[in-house]
Image: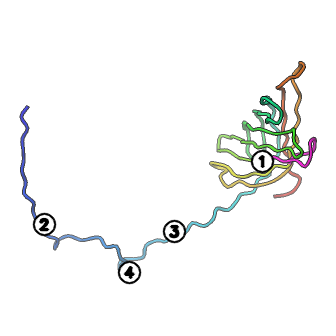
Amino acid sequence: MIRKRFRRRPEFESLESMVLLSGGFAPEHGLAALVVTGPKVKTPIALTGSAIGNYRFGHGLGTPINFGAIGLIKPLGGLTLKGSMLFEIQNPTGQVTISTSHGKVFATLSATSPGSVFSYTITGGTGKWANASGTGDAFVFTVPAGGVGSTHGRISINFVNLTDV
C-alpha cells in the first residue's frame, strides 16, 4: 500500500471577520444567570412499621450479630433491611441500611442498657431519601433457633414514632 504524503505550509488566517469569545462581562447582551446552591434541607420522616428476618452471630465474644429482614415501614413502603448490632456491651448499638425501590435510608440504633428500647436516628440516605432525617424508637426482638449454643435465629424490628416530626 502506498501512502500519499501531503505537505502543507503554515498559513496565517485573518481574524478580522471572526467573532472572538470574551472572558469578560458584556452588559449590553444580557445578564448571565446566577445559580446559588444552598445547604440541602433535611426532610424529617417518622418510621412506623416492622421488618422480620434472620440473624447470625459473628465468631467470638463482643462480635456483632448480622441480620437481614423484609418488611413494610411507612412512609418508605416495602423494603429490605440489613444491619448489625452489638448486644453484649453496656450500651447496645447498631446500624441499619433500609433499601427501597426509591433509594436507601441509613440509621443508627442505640440503647441505654441491655434489654431496653432502642432509639433510632436517621443519618442520611440516597435517591428519594437523600435528605432524610428523623428519630424515634425501635423494639428489637430475637428468638434463637433450636439447639444448644445456637448462633442464629429470627429477628423482628418494630419502628415506632410517638412524636410528630
Q: Select label 3 or label 1 by which is in front.
A: 1
Image quadrant occupied by the N terminus? top left
What mark, if any, has residue 108 been given in the picture?
1
Quadrant in which residue 61 is drawn: top right
CB contact under 8 Å: marks 2 and 3: no
Tag 4: residue type?
Pro
Image quadrant occupied by the C terminus? bottom right
Place of residue 84 in the rendered image (x, y in percent of width and height, measured from the top left): 77, 38
Which element is circle 4 on?
helix
Quadrant in which residue 39 is drawn: bottom right
What mark, if any, has residue 13 been given in the picture?
2
Tag 1: residue type?
Thr
- Mark 2 and mark 1 lie on one chain; the one further toward the N terminus is 2
Which element is circle 1 on?
strand
Magenta stretch, main secondary structure class: loop
What mark, if any, has residue 35 been given in the picture?
3
Place of residue 91 in the rendered image (x, y in percent of width and height, measured from the top left): 87, 46
What mark, if any, has residue 27 been given in the picture?
4
Q: Nearer the viewer, residue 56 or 127?
A: 56
CB contact under 8 Å: marks 3 and 1: no
Q: Nearer the viewer, residue 79 or 110?
A: 110
Q: Select label 4 or label 1 by which is in front.
A: 1
Numbered range of the magenta stretch? 109-118
C-alpha distance separating marks 3 and 1: 35 Å
C-alpha distance separating marks 2 and 3: 38 Å
